[in-house]
Amino acid sequence: MTFLNEVTARYPNALSFAPGRPTEEHFDVRSVHRHLERFCDHLSRDLGHGPAEVNRTLCQYGRTSGIVHDLIARHLEVDEGMQVDPESIVVTVGCQEAMFLTLRSLRRDERDVVLAVAPTYVGLTGAARLVDLPVVPVASGATGIDLTDLAAKLRLVRERGLRPRGCYVVPDFANPSGLRMDLATRRALLDLAAREGILLLEDNPYGMFHDGSGRLPTLKALDTDRTVVYLGSFAKTVLPGARVGYLIADQRVRDAQGRVGGFAEQLSRIKSMVTVNTSPVSQAVIGGALLENDFSLARGTVRERQSYQRNLAHLLRGLESRFQRCPDVSWNTPHGGFFVVVSVPFAADDELLERSGQEFGVLWTPMSHFYDGKEGRNQLRLSCSSLSDEQLEEGLNRLAALFADRGVDPC
Ligand SMILES: Cc1ncc(COP(=O)(O)O)c(C=O)c1O
């Protein structure tokens, strides 16, 4: 990521398909003030807190597991049909901290490993590296996870005397692949994980942003065996600047001293030593946004969803019109989210990215960054979330010029 940030900084005038950032079209700092007010009103009007208590809730150090856990539980019920005990929720500093805490707790000694669908979101691989937990890649196939490969990898890992502790998946419009798991795959994955005794770490920042084809139930909504730890983010549904995410960990676990308790409690104890608590001011902003939308972010993000749907359709149409007759160029057709993966007949590596920025004024992400081996060398990830129509059009023209320079005949 550092390299990509550096490239972006070197070519500030380049059009960039690289960052998976939400659109800034609807950012409005006044809504931050409004949400804060709304949350404070909720504390005083709905919960009967006096002014001193309201001040303390927002200005003082706070509860480690968070202060908007009950509001998040209501949002999960309204938008995801999930019945979640608020006590099993830990509010975190972005989804990134939720990943870190979960991986840290799964890593007891050098025999532990985590599996992850490859290509893998770099935030997960980075956090795993920090806690010294090896990541074993599982093929994604066409359905978002190749279950035969998952079973084979679990066997292989165990034969080597290692302990597979969990498998990380992004079932909805994954970053970077854009793939969505179908319902049958979700059910089969849950069965397999329960049989094998591994946790599924379900990360879901893009689920709201379907292309009009509707949503599928999350793994957690289908989870009857407490197999899933759910990792949530408000970065794409409210605002990334608040840095608020959460996890749901409703499992019972034994800690290092042999005490049995809630997994959320255990993760909260780790959090108390990492970030102490998530900023109550930031949580109040998110809480206010949930209250303002009657807990439905599906309703609260209609404009964003439509904008991403439009951009994704524009990007796919643009690829079609430029490369449909190029037999060596292909791409997938995601049903939502921010990302499309393009396969090309040349190495789409860091060196080419540098040239692409310098000579063609267009940036993208080499897919090799999402693998730990040689895979992805001929693929690039295009993100369409934060570009205007004109930028998308011009960016695609520049991309076509780069491809032509690499020997791809325009059609
Ligand atoms: C798959 C995935 N998980 C998590 C995140 C980060 O979430 P947060 O900003 O809440 O830490 C991202 C952000 O790009 C992502 O793509």
Image: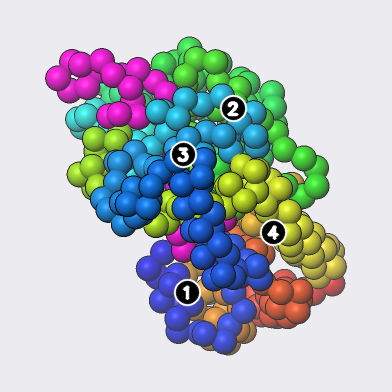
Q: Secondary structure at mark 2?
A: loop
Looking at the image, tell me whether mark 2 or mark 3 is earlier in sequence order: 3
Looking at the image, tell me whether mark 4 or mark 2 is earlier in sequence order: 2
Cβ–Cβ under 8 Å for marks 4 and 3 = no
Q: Secondary structure at mark 4?
A: helix
Residue found at x 80% / y 42%: 213
| Image position, residue 234 (x, y; %) | 52, 51
- Image quadrant for the N terminus? bottom left
Cβ–Cβ under 8 Å for marks 4 and 2 = no
Q: Which residue is mark 4?
A: 304
Q: Alpha carbon of mark 4 to alpha carbon of mark 3: how far? A: 32 Å
**Mark 3, other Cα within 10 Å: few <14 / some 14–19 / many ≥20:** few
Q: Which residue is mark 1?
A: 351
Is ligand 1 closer than 8 angstroms to the Cβ of mark 1? no
Is ligand 1 closer than 8 angstroms to the Cβ of mark 4? no
Q: Which residue is mark 3?
A: 47
Residue found at x 64% / y 28%: 81
